[in-house]
């Protein structure tokens, strides 16, 4: 069975750019992610278009609000047919439980994922917020996310092996901050290469700019798939 591990974020400002990228790849090669920039400019219609082309879509809107609002938001996301949706774990247990309960009655239930600590943040960023370093804060939030009945977390691959031990084999680990050797780090802090991320236990690798900004995005995607032993 084809089960691509790479999720490519469609971090574009216009729908036509996202559709152009989607036309060059297939659902066997990668999954796709729609985040705040594209969703704000192109809206739910674009998400439905991508779903209708057969792609697994991760709707990365990181909902963070009171329980009732987040519950209604994830339900609206599920109606678009997305494969994965996420909330901020810092929204707390009651918010995550409400989100999970809102999805339970649905026939099409997307994976519900909690964002632990953004991969752009390091220990100093967290200290400014009165939070512990990633090695402490991420497992704490992952444990809470699991207890709330969510399907997994967004974390950095640097935390993958400890979370795999703590949360078990079925708990999905979705890891942005992936940087193939030699690519630019940009605004990411907690990074890892695709090969090391898979070895550490990541289920899904979110890889954006190293693919979308490369001279030949499709060739780069093929190279990454090959490097992690996925034939596509
Ligand atoms: O902790 C997080 C959560 C989400 N993201 C998103 O992933 C991609 C990463 O893109 P790159 O170009 O590979 O840096 C982007 O859409 C972020 O919004 C994250 O990076 N970290």
Image: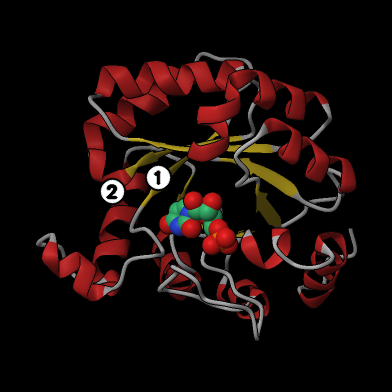
Question: Is label 1 or label 2 in front?
Answer: 1
Badge 2 density bin: few <14, some 14–19, many ≥20, Cα 10 Å: some
Q: Which mark is residue 229?
A: none
| Marks 1 and 2, the one that precedes in the sequence | 1
Q: Is residue 173 among what the camera can see? A: no
How far apart in space, not on screen, are marks 1 and 2 (Cα)?
Answer: 9 Å
Secondary structure at numbered mark 2: helix
Secondary structure at numbered mark 1: strand
Q: Is 45 or 31 nearer to us in this picture?
A: 45
Q: Quadrant of residue 49?
A: top right
Which residue, given by chain and number where applicable, does mark 2 sit on?
144
Where residue 80 sits: x, y (%)? 62, 19
In the rendered image of this protein, does residue 227 appear above or below residue 202?
Answer: below
Q: Are marks 1 and 2 in contact (CB under 8 Å)?
A: yes
Residue depicted at x 58% and y 69%: 178
Which residue, given by chain and number where applicable, does mark 1 sit on?
114
Residue depicted at x 65% and y 45%: 10
Q: Residue furthest bottom?
A: 182
């Amino acid at each position: 069975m084809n089960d691509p591990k790479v999720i490519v974020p469609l971090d574009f400002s216009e729908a036509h750019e996202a559709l152009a990228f989607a036309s060059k790849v297939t659902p066997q090669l990668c999954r796709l992610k729609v985040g705040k920039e594209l969703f704000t400019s192109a809206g739910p219609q674009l998400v439905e278009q991508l779903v209708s082309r057969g792609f697994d879509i991760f709707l990365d809107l990181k909902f963070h609000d009171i329980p009732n609002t987040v519950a209604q938001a994830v339900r609206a996301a599920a109606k678009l047919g997305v494969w994965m949706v996420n909330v901020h774990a810092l929204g707390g247990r009651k918010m995550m439980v409400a989100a999970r309960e809102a999805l339970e009655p649905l026939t099409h239930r997307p994976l519900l994922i909690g964002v632990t600590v953004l991969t752009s943040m390091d220990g100093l960023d967290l200290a400014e917020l009165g939070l512990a370093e990633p090695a402490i804060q991420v497992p704490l939030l992952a444990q809470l996310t699991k207890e709330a009945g969510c399907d997994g977390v967004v974390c950095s691959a640097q935390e993958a092996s400890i979370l795999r031990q703590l949360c078990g084999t079925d708990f999905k680990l979705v890891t942005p901050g992936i940087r193939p050797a030699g690519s630019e780090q940009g605004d990411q802090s907690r990074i890892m290469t695709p090969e090391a991320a898979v070895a550490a236990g990541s289920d899904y690798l979110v890889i954006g700019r190293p693919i979308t900004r490369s001279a030949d995005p499709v060739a780069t995607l093929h190279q990454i798939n090959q490097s992690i032993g996925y034939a596509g």
